[in-house]
Image (cartoon, rainbow, N blue to C red):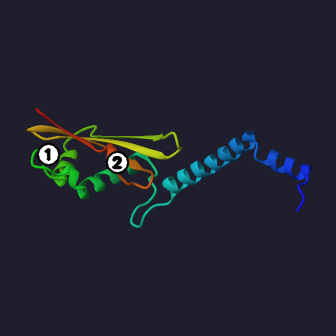
Amino acid sequence: MTNDPSKMARIANTFRPRNMVLLFGVLLAIWIAQFAYRNNNVCSPGDRIIQSDTDAIEVAKNKLVKDPFFSSQEFGSASEFIDAFHQTSNCCQAVRRRTLFFVIVWDVFLVAETPAKRLTAQMGLSNCGTIFAETKFKAIEPR
């Protein structure tokens, strides 16, 4: 086996740092695109893509009733919270945003007022309606 200098030079040129950085950049861009597509468009069974602010609020209300985080002794049950929406004007707000990795997040704010207290819930939903665990928040204010 002979060592051909021109063949060795071609191999060395292929693995230049510039080429490796370019390859890494392309692979990172492909991964980000795949990650964003999967999180924005591939929903689990029973979920669907959120189409509007109103749709995000309805999905949040449905998820609120099913999530045990929002039911407690002080806060009351989630179903009581949902019933209090009908008595509160301007109870809900949804804002759509994109993260650094192009994932769509719906930030939903829900406020319900009862005669004794004001209940506030905030959550971040994926574009398919899944609640991000680190974005759940609830507060109770006496009236």
Q: Residue at x 59, y 51 (%)?
A: 31
Residue 136's x, y, as percent?
Answer: 29, 45
Give whichever of 71, 118 is nearer the camera.
Answer: 71
Judge by depth and name the residue closer to the eye, 114 or 109.
109
Q: Position of residue 105 (x, y in %)?
A: 44, 45
Which image quarter is the C terminus in? top left
> At label 2, which amino acid type do we have?
Ile
Residue at the spot 54% in from the left edge and 52% down from the top edge: 35
Whether residues under marks 2 and 1 lie with C-beta atoms below 8 angstroms apart, the answer is: no
Residue where numbered disc 1 is placed? 75
Q: Residue furthest front?
A: 1
Under tag 1, what secondary structure? loop
Residue sitting at x 63%, y 46%: 29
Q: What residue is pinned by disc 2? A: 57
Q: Above or below — where is 139 with respect to 65?
A: above
Percent position of residue 8, x then y: 85, 50
